Image (tube, helix red, strand yellow):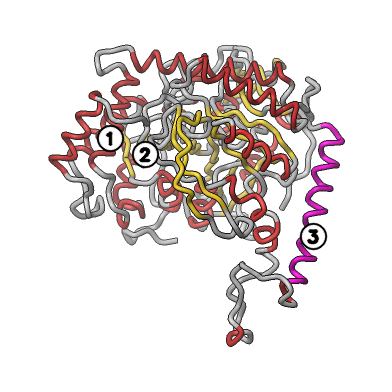
């Protein structure tokens, strides 16, 4: 794939494969409570931080009833499609016009089956309109449907002071206006609300340069570049880093933005099992030994792509082991820290700080400002060579409008608060409160008997519901109790692993969390959601398995 500058996409080289002077030092590497020796550049390497993650398996009866539920809904779906086809029941879904029946179909009827017959039954649990700032409490506009969720109408009633357990407002910085936001107001008065140009033309402001310098300082790297949209930071920049003749090794649970960027790049993509170092090493070894298909030439680049915190699982990247493999096989590493930057690590600097890894060991550090910083946009950071390459070849820099100046100022304000450059310890206190709230909420859910996924330090806490009917009932009942939750089902999760996803915030008080936990305890009994039997799942064993088959 050609880049916008007219040169080859693979025209640059990363240069941070450095010899480690301490590579001969031994430390303990612990995975899932099991001490295991790692290898780094052929020499023993150990890591002494426990990685405690929970992926308890569901009871057999829960899985049986989940699949039975989907089976029954599917049968009724076919019956209703039969009635719609014969005009007995009105079809509200998009259909082909009669005069275009001989054209190539615009709508794939079978592909929309799930949307028509399953999603529409519980559609009221998503896209609820919010009419306030996404603080620890928010206001929800009430809506009802008269045609089984095909159309909604607003009642005019506002549901006030709903406890917000769904927004990625980890540090509580996305809130109503106060005097600390005066600098944002000042920037709005000076610069206006938008830039109306791209970074390549007249859209690079001094505010952007100030922010980029601050991001580089925060991450302890040489340089950084910021973009106006977090999703596009991945999807529009990965094609500028790799292309045809390159190999991408992607975690199977990577975000859609990473998947889209990888596909747009034209590189060959191979998927490794989630956080599974044996699966990744097998792919790396095969890539080095066999090279490209047919020609057997060496790959131009091998790029490992992973996330800091996985938003649907709540698990944290096993960074020390991945860095060791990256160095051993001379590959490059791209980490998406959208959910981990500003949320983990003693000073909020993400998974590199959490594990005590030198940021220079990660070739490309990507993150977004949409979670912990209460703003929008994203960044890519690393060596000056990489960032300078992106300034020229990034599709986002060439074609997308630059970040709004008030947004840039909000990020600067938030980042200075986290770094303590505002002259207070408020940022550190928020980080400590987030960690405290996370551990408390996770521990209480476990004690109640719910199955929850993820790392004990992750502020994203998935709670398994399994059955689609319970998913809808749970969300509706919680809103009646003035608690806003996010529920997630297929295709965002595996078919039988529907869940509620809680996002803990530093702005949550202990009283708020106890109110939510009390409601969850009641819902757990009412809907029979306490599936946990406190036994180890087969799922974490994937991390240490040595024999497996990979899908083509």
Position in image of residue 33 (x %, y %): 70, 16
Image quadrant of residue 315?
top right
Q: Which residue is mark 1?
A: 212
Image quadrant of residue 486?
top right
Position in image of residue 126 (x %, y %): 56, 46
Q: Residues within 10 Å of mark 3 (few under 14, many from 20)?
A: some
Provide the secondary structure element on which disc 1 rests. helix
- The alpha-carbon separation of the residues under discs 3 and 2 comes to 47 Å
Q: Which residue is mark 2?
A: 379
Chief SS of the magenta region: helix
Residue 69 falls inside the magenta stretch: yes
Q: Which residue is mark 3?
A: 76
Q: Which residue is depicted at the point 61% across and 43% down?
A: 288
Residue 183 falls inside the magenta stretch: no
Q: Judge depth for marks 3 and 1 and give the one in front.
A: 3
Span highlighted in magenta in the image: 59-83
Q: Which residue is depicted at the point 54% across and 41% down?
A: 305
Position in image of residue 460 (x %, y %): 56, 29
Q: Left of 455 or right of it: where is 173?
A: left
- The alpha-carbon separation of the residues under discs 3 and 1 comes to 55 Å
Q: Which residue is depicted at the point 33% across and 61% down?
A: 6
383 to 85, vertically: above or below? above
Looking at this view, name the residue that lies furthest to the left: 190
The disc, 3 or 1, on the residue closer to the chain's N-terminal end is 3
Q: Left of 255 or right of it: where is 526?
A: right
Position in image of residue 7 (x %, y %): 35, 58
Q: Left of 376 or right of it: where is 94?
A: right
Q: Are marks 2 and 1 in contact (CB under 8 Å)?
A: yes
Provide the secondary structure element on which disc 3 rests. helix
Pick whichever, 325 or 351, lies toward us.
351
Q: Are marks 3 and 2 in contact (CB under 8 Å)?
A: no
Q: Which residue is depicted at the point 65% across and 40% down?
A: 285
């Amino acid at each position: 794939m050609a880049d916008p500058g007219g040169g080859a996409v693979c025209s640059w080289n990363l240069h941070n494969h450095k010899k480690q002077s301490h590579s001969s030092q031994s430390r303990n590497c612990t995975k899932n409570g099991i001490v295991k020796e790692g290898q780094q550049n052929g020499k023993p390497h150990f890591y002494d931080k426990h990685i405690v993650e929970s992926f308890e398996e569901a009871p057999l009866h829960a899985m049986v009833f989940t699949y039975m539920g989907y089976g029954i809904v599917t049968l009724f779906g076919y019956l209703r499609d039969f009635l719609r086809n014969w005009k007995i029941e009105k079809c509200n879904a998009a259909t082909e016009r009669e005069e275009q029946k001989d054209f190539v179909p615009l709508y794939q009827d079978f592909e929309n089956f799930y949307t028509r017959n399953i999603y529409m039954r519980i559609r009221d649990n998503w896209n609820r309109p919010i009419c306030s700032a996404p603080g620890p409490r928010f206001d929800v506009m009430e809506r009802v449907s008269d045609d089984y969720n095909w159309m909604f109408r607003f009642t005019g009633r506002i549901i006030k002071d709903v406890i917000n357990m769904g927004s990625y407002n980890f540090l509580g910085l996305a809130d109503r206006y106060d005097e600390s936001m005066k600098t944002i107001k000042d920037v709005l008065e000076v610069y206006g609300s938008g830039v109306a140009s791209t970074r390549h033309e007249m859209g690079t402001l001094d505010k952007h340069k100030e922010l980029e310098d601050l991001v580089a300082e925060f991450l302890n790297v040489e340089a950084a570049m910021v973009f106006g949209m977090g999703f596009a930071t991945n999807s529009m920049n990965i094609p500028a880093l790799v292309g045809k003749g390159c190999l991408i090794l992607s975690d199977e649970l990577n975000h859609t933005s990473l998947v889209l960027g990888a596909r747009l790049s034209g590189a060959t993509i191979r998927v490794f099992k989630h956080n599974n170092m044996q699966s990744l090493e097998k792919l790396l070894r095969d890539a080095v030994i066999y090279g490209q298909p047919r020609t057997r030439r060496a790959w131009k680049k091998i790029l490992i792509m992973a996330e800091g915190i996985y938003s649907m699982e709540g698990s944290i990247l096993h960074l020390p082991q991945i860095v060791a493999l990256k160095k051993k096989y001379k590959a490059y590493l791209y980490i998406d820290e959208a959910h981990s930057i500003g949320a983990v690590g003693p000073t909020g600097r993400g998974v590199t700080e959490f594990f005590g890894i030198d940021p220079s060991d990660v070739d490309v550090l990507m993150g977004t400002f949409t979670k912990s910083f209460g703003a929008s946009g994203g960044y890519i950071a690393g060596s000056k060579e990489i960032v300078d390459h992106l300034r020229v070849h990034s599709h986002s820099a060439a074609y997308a409008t630059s970040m709004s100046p008030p947004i840039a100022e909000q990020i600067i304000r938030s980042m200075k608060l986290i770094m303590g450059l505002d002259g207070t310890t408020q940022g550190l206190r928020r980080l400590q409160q987030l960690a405290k709230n996370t551990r408390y909420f996770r521990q209480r859910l476990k004690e109640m008997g719910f199955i929850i996924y993820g790392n004990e330090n992750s502020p994203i806490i998935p709670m398994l519901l399994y059955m689609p009917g319970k998913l809808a009932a749970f969300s509706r009942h919680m809103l009646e109790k003035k608690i806003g939750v996010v529920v997630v089902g297929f295709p965002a999760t595996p078919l039988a692993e529907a869940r509620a996803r809680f996002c803990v915030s530093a702005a949550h008080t202990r009283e708020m969390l106890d109110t939510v936990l009390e409601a969850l305890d009641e819902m757990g009994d009412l809907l029979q959601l306490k599936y946990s039997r406190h036994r180890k799942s087969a799922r974490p064993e994937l991390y240490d398995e040595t024999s497996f088959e990979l899908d083509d």
